Amino acid sequence: MNFLNGWTIDNYLSLILLIGMAIGSIFALIQWNSSIRIRRTEFLDEIINKLWFDQSMAKTMYNIDNDPAWYTGDFHKNYSDMGYQIDKLLSYFDFICYLYEIKNIKYDEFNVIKYEIDRACASPSVQAYLWNLYHFSNEIEAGCSFMYIINYGIKEKIIKNDFKSNNKDLFNKYLKF
């Protein structure tokens, strides 16, 4: 071992210390990755619990599934508890779609709740509601509250591609725009 000729004890101790630091850094990286996985799992668990076990969310999803014609001209006349619950659920789905778009939720994590979001996007009443809100918000030059779920639905071909057009043949117009 010619490359070690002329080394002092300080050089050997520095080498040993450097190797020890490298091993410690590897263990710290493993622990850090493990804690990130645990936090992601806990976050996904919170999302699932809210969607499936929050009674108002579960009931609203049930209503969306089983009453395909809940969005009518009377919906906006007296903002009911149902309106609040629909907005709450769609806001939650919109937030999840936002997190997915900015890659804070990975595909495998999103896939766990994708079915519920897809079911909501496929609802004729949800689409009509979102269409009315989208065009109303454009008319008053305000951003639509549900752009991430709308964009997700269009991208996944659940919502028609011409959704953003003001084609009045797509849905009944219930808001003034």
Image: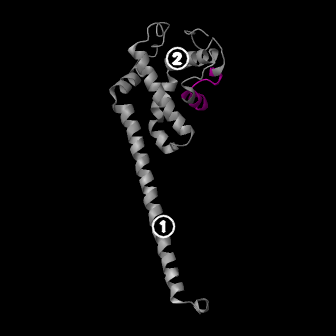
Dot 1: what SS?
A: helix
Q: Is residue 164 left or right of residue 133?
A: right
Residue depth check, mark 2 versus mark 1: number of the one nearer the observer = 1
Magenta-tinted stretch: 149-163
Asked if residue 4 is positioned above or below residue 125 in the image, the reply reads: below
Q: N-terminal of the two: label 2 or label 1?
A: 1
The quadrant where residue 34 appears: bottom left
Magenta stretch: includes residue 155: yes
* Residue under numbered circle 1: 25
Query: In which quadrant is the C terminus drawn?
Result: top right
Residue 63 x/y as whole percent: 40, 19
Q: Is residue 16 left or right of residue 166?
A: left
Q: Amino acid at mark 2?
A: Tyr
Residue 157 seen in the current view: no
* Residue at figure coordinates x 46%, y 16% from the top left: 68
What's the colour scheme? one colour
* Residue under numbered circle 2: 129
Specify few, some or many for label 2: CA neighbours under 10 Å numbering under 14, 14-19, or 20 or more: many
Asked if residue 88 is positioned above or below residue 170 in the image, the reply reads: below
Residue nearest the observer in this picture, 78 or 13: 13
Q: Main secondary structure of the magenta part?
A: helix
The quadrant where residue 44 appears: top left
* Residue at figure coordinates x 61%, y 92% from the top left: 2
How far apart marks 2 and 1 lie (CA) works out to 53 Å
